[in-house]
Image (cartoon, rainbow, N blue to C red):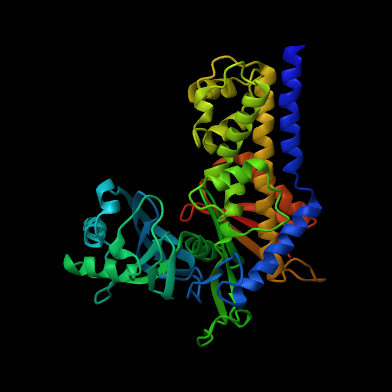
Amino acid sequence: MRCSGRWARAMAILREFEENCGTPIGKLRQVADAMAVEMHAGLASEGGSKLKMLISYVDNLPSGEENGLFYALDLGGTNFRVIRVLLGGKDGGVVKQEFEEVSIPPHLMTGSSDALFGFIATALANFVATESEGLHPSPGRQRELGFTFSFPVRQTSIASGNLIKWTKGFLIDDVVGQDVVGELTKAMERIGLDMRVSALVNDTIGTLAGGRYHNPDVIAAVILGTGTNAAYVERAQAIPKWHGLLPKSGEMVINMEWGNFRSSHLPLTEYDQDLDVESLNPGEQIFEKIISGMYLGEIVRRVLLKMAEEAAFFGDIVPPKLKIPFILRTPHMSAMHHDESSDLRVVGSKLKDILEIPHTSLKMRKAIVELCDIVATRGARLSAAGIVGIIKKLGRDTVKDGDKQKSVIAMDGGLYEHYSKFSTCMESTLKELLEKKFLTTSPLSSLTMAQALELLS
């Protein structure tokens, strides 16, 4: 009786959590509508919305007809990548692509600007020195570099932007407030590297540009990885806070910073509220904290901890490892969620290896898989609602007779690429929300490792 009472209590905790995570179609429509409203507010004035709706100064995207040699530098964490790509014009596509990944020594992450950018410039120069025959720029033409910099920046032009603050373990005070392109350019000049930074973008805009290179119908990009963000192409006249000259193209790419979206319609639970309060940025990035890879596994851990503490789910003693925040990462959760063995042995081995819980029954393992499903399903369905919000804002959510206009969303990020139950659920939810106006999901290319969600609207 004692055991069955405990089991009933554990299941009651799980059922209550499931109910509070509910995403019925009506609620998702409310979330999509709220996203569109916040987008309008963020475009109207600075600080007018939880969505920053940053003007990127990118008013032209690739057409697929570009040709020549280009370099890229991707700095977004403890490693950076240098990339060389040869584009062959309209029919040639990506002729050749080479890249190198470099780890940043920890002392440079908290040192000086000269030390960090000097290290990066040297790595770039070493990479340039490996150019093979036929991969040199045309005579008299300077090498061009696209700089993907995934830290908060106040953009001032297509190729300049001041660092607002460091994140991800970096803390170099003399860069804050400075133009990061200027810092990199000075470092390249110091070592005699003849290269010009022609664009400064973040990773989401990079995905959008890579998507458009392969498909002219790409209108937006969404990153679903450790973090999450979205960028899209807006009509320049629909941006009241833009006071400059209207670009010739009539368009402007907007970096939404959608991780900071919040709405009373989001299905938040006590576990989400506790996670937020204990986080490094309480009250911020609420949408990110319920849909992105950084947090999904942690939400599962918090529910399991309550089941252990209040229903002795793992026996009389609460497993000590279960009390450690972020010990259960989203890749572990994904492995358990995708376990199709008859005895759920992957679930058993993850519990043993990570949480040091040696003995679990099949019934317990099934409950844990169900918990993973609840958390992933909520995240995937809310991601879909966010995408529909963008499509609504652009007026592409309705079909007129004879209209063959397509809307393609370029997708990137480890959560979307590797957690297949998450991405499958997201795609089926899009289908449901757009009432069958959904065509296909197709990979874009290895250039962006992105996926395209193609929506007929």
> Which quarter of the image is occupied by the N terminus?
top right
Q: Can see residue 416?
A: no
Number of labels in the image equals: 0
Question: What is the quadrant of residue 198 in the picture?
Answer: bottom left
Residue found at x 27% / y 73%? 142
**Outermost residue toward the left?**
191
Residue found at x 55% / y 56%? 284
Residue 454 picture location, percent across and down: 66, 58
Residue 280 picture location, percent across and down: 48, 49
Question: What is the quadrant of residue 121 in the picture?
Answer: bottom left
Residue 65 picture location, percent across and down: 47, 71
Residue found at x 78% / y 52%? 432
Residue 191 picture location, percent across and down: 17, 65
Q: For this view, does 364 lie left or right of residue 284?
A: right
Observer-nearest of 36 and 412: 36
Q: Can see residue 96?
A: yes
> Which quarter of the image is occupied by the C terminus?
bottom right
**Outermost residue toward the bottom?**
245
Observer-nearest of 299 and 151: 299
* In this view, 15 is above or below 343: below
